[in-house]
Amino acid sequence: MSGSKKEFAVIGLGRFGGSICRELSQLGMEVMAIDVDEDRVNEFSNIASHAVIADSTDELVLKSLGIRNFDHVVVAIGDNIQASILTTLMLKELGVENITVKATNDYHEKVLRKIGADQVVHPERDMGKRIANTIASTSVLDYLELSDEHSVVELMANKRIHGQTLRDLNIRARFGLNIVAIKRGKEIFVSPRATEAIYEGDILIMIGADDEIDRFEAYLEK
């Protein structure tokens, strides 16, 4: 999903952290890839904007990386629960605004939430690609991959399309997308009519090709 250029740091370049790092890079975001393992860092040196060998449990190291200046930090440390918790705690203390952390189990999640993680994810349940798309965008609320090129996405309607009907917007002809439902507060309109007006804050559930979803999102964010 396209969006304004944000700066991300991904700490831990295992399968999960690696997939987030790759996807954010493909989305054109600035990404710093961080791991203690030199081989993993080397693997991402041509993928991420910066790839750094660093111990994220060392506060001085985090400070030297300017970690607090990043818009969003993803802690994707694998089996070392202690390192994951310590890293999250230090990121919070350093004033990082948005922290997403991978949890290994429910107990781990409880601790992460207590110490102030903004989002806690379980990679077994959440795809790296889906999470990357959601955190990279200002208007994407949820994202579900149907195939390599097609997705279902929830987008928040903004002022740009407020008050326009589906017919006015002509989304199918202009973007090749289908709006399958509109959520408005507690109501949901399935297969909305062409005369249905869209209001700021409505959630549009759309299906279509990833490229076209990107294009529509860019149109919303102009």
Image (spheres, rainbow, N blue to C red):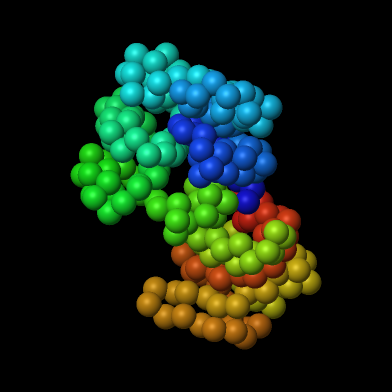
Report the residue at 50% width, 24% height from top: 37
Residue 209 percent coordinates (x, y): 72, 63
- Residue 93, how many percent across, how many down? 27, 27
**Residue drawn 52% across the image and 34% down it:** 13
Which of the 4 image quarters holds residue 112? Answer: top left
**Is residue 177 left or right of 125 when viewed as pictured?**
right
Residue 138 appears in the picture as rendered? no
For the point 28% across and 49% down, the residue is 109
Q: Please say whether residue 21 is visible from this viewpoint.
A: yes
Q: Quadrant of residue 82?
A: top left
| 66 relative position to 176: left or right | left
Of residues 27 and 165, the one nearer the viewer is 27
In the image: residue 116, left or right of residue 142:
left
In this view, the residue in front, 13 or 150, is 13
Q: In percent of the image, x 68 and y 27: which residue is there? A: 46
Q: Which quadrant of the figure has residue 80?
A: top left
Q: Nearer the viewer, residue 64 or 171?
A: 64
| Whether residue 163 is situated above or below residue 88 in the rendered picture | below
Position in image of residue 155 (x %, y %)? 55, 62
Picture mark count: 0
**Residue 141: x and y, percent?**
49, 59
Relative to 66, say whether 191 is above or below: below
